Amino acid sequence: MAVVATPWRGAFASLRARAARIAEFVTTPVLPSDYLDMISPLRASADLRGRIEEVHPETRDAVTLVIQPGGGWRGHVPGQYVRIGVDVDGVRQWRAYSLTSRADRADGRISITVKAMPDGVVSNYLVRRVRPGTLIQLDQAKGDFTLPAPRPAKALFVTAGSGITPVMGMLRNAVSELDDVVVVHSAPQPRDVIFADELRRLAEQGQIRLVERHTDVEGMLNLAALDGIVADWAERETWACGPTGLLDAAEKQWSDAGVPDRLHIERFRPTVVVTGEGGDVTFSNTGTTVAADGATPLLDTGERAGVLMPSGCRMGICFGCVAPLRTGAVRDLRNGQITTAEPGDDVRIQTCVSAAAGTCDIEL
Ligand SMILES: Cc1cc2nc3c(=O)[nH]c(=O)nc-3n(C[C@H](O)[C@H](O)[C@H](O)COP(=O)(O)OP(=O)(O)OC[C@H]3O[C@@H](n4cnc5c(N)ncnc54)[C@H](O)[C@@H]3O)c2cc1C
Ligand code: FES
């Protein structure tokens, strides 16, 4: 239908613009958008936020958070993750969490499931302290740890600990579309299995074959023994998520078997391959200089020195931590590659996967 311009429409728009300018003038230094943020923080035109609506304990150290995303949320594909920004003791922290909810919930809510890490700043805050009603920053969902279309004839999921989360996102959404599913999951004890009841129910209903490995009693899962657990593992399209050791072993095993393309991996931590000499690191905007070793990411170095560091996934995939390297040398911890900068160069580095390789100056 054609939109017909009318004189009153133009006059109304100009009146509205003038009213907005007057509102901005009388509310300065707080802008009207700041007031709107207080009244309607989840509106579509605001920065993307979410409100934690429910907190459900899963195990002794894991909870599921149900979040109402703001109007700008564009949805997700099961298996993807979302970056969230939370204020912990006055400092904004960003972390990534896999989405565990159905993608088509009638109320539009999403969920993430967080396991507390020893000494973990954000995970402990979310597991032990956060309350319903808390507002958080959200980013759009990302990631390619997802199921293909058409679905594979035979699927295998190999997970450990919190690595079950993206897989549960896929199972909740698509288990009825998968004919033959095996889930091999490790946790220290039966009570540590996140989503235990749901996984066992799916197994009882014949929708998945579930192999639980309780590592306190049975020891760590040795993938070399997978033949005895899932005889046809090499024929299955496989998704694996868990600690670095398990994922590195899986990559080697699938590669040795000549089927590396059948393995899809989600890492929660970067693989650190090389470390080296450190040096003095200056964060020039804040006038902070600290000695750093050659193994600690500059993101951690800066945070420990009290510098407000931008961040996100903390493992080199989201680019939320990129900062200008003004001078000096840094080493990419994933491959050992050295990046150097002279004054005036336009060099940017990912601080979460870079460590000092001599004296360096970061513009933060
Ligand atoms: C794509 C992606 C999806 C993720 N999904 C989930 C999820 O669904 N559920 C979940 O609980 N976590 C998930 N994570 C991990 C999460 O982002 C945080 O890294 C984790 O919660 C720890 O943050 P923290 O602030 O508590 O720990 P920090 O304060 O950052 O670190 C505390 C200590 O723990 C170590 N550490 C941090 N993370 C890990 C880890 N994963 N394994 C081992 N040691 C670690 C650090 O080196 C440090 O010594 C995901 C990460 C990525 C990249
Ligand atoms: S924090 Fe995501 S790439 Fe560095």
Image: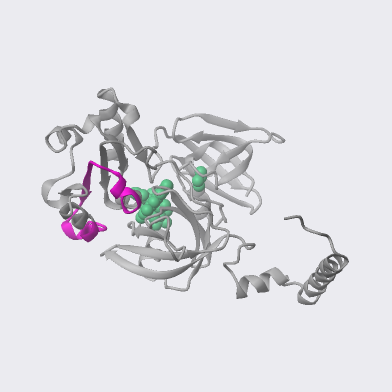
User: Which image quarter: residue 65?
Assistant: bottom left
Q: Residue at x 43, y 64 (%)?
A: 106
Lateral position of residue 67 relative to residue 71, left or right: left
Number of marks present in the image shown:
0
- Quadrant (top left/top right/bottom left/bottom right) for the N terminus: bottom right
Q: Residue at x 40, y 60 (%)?
A: 111
In the image, 91 versus 195, the foreground residue is 195
Residue 316 spot, x, y in % from top left: 48, 41
Residue 133 spot, x, y in % from top left: 47, 73
Lateral position of residue 154 relative to residue 212, left or right: right
In the image, 207 versus 45, the foreground residue is 207
User: Which image quarter: residue 66?
Assistant: bottom left
In the image, 129 versus 96, the foreground residue is 96
Depicted 108 relative to depicted 291: above or below: below
The colour scheme applied to this rendered structure is one colour
User: Which image quarter: residue 103?
Assistant: bottom left
Q: Residue at x 53, y 54 (%)?
A: 74
Q: Residue at x 40, y 54 (%)?
A: 99
Is residue 99 located in the magenta-colored stretch of the structure? no
Depicted 30 relative to depicted 4: above or below: below
Residue 297 spot, x, y in % from top left: 47, 44
Depicted 187 relative to depicted 131: above or below: above
Residue 346 spot, x, y in % from top left: 68, 36
Looking at the rendering, the stretch of residues picked out in magenta corresponds to: 171-198
Is residue 197 located in the magenta-colored stretch of the structure? yes
Lateral position of residue 325 relative to residue 132, left or right: right
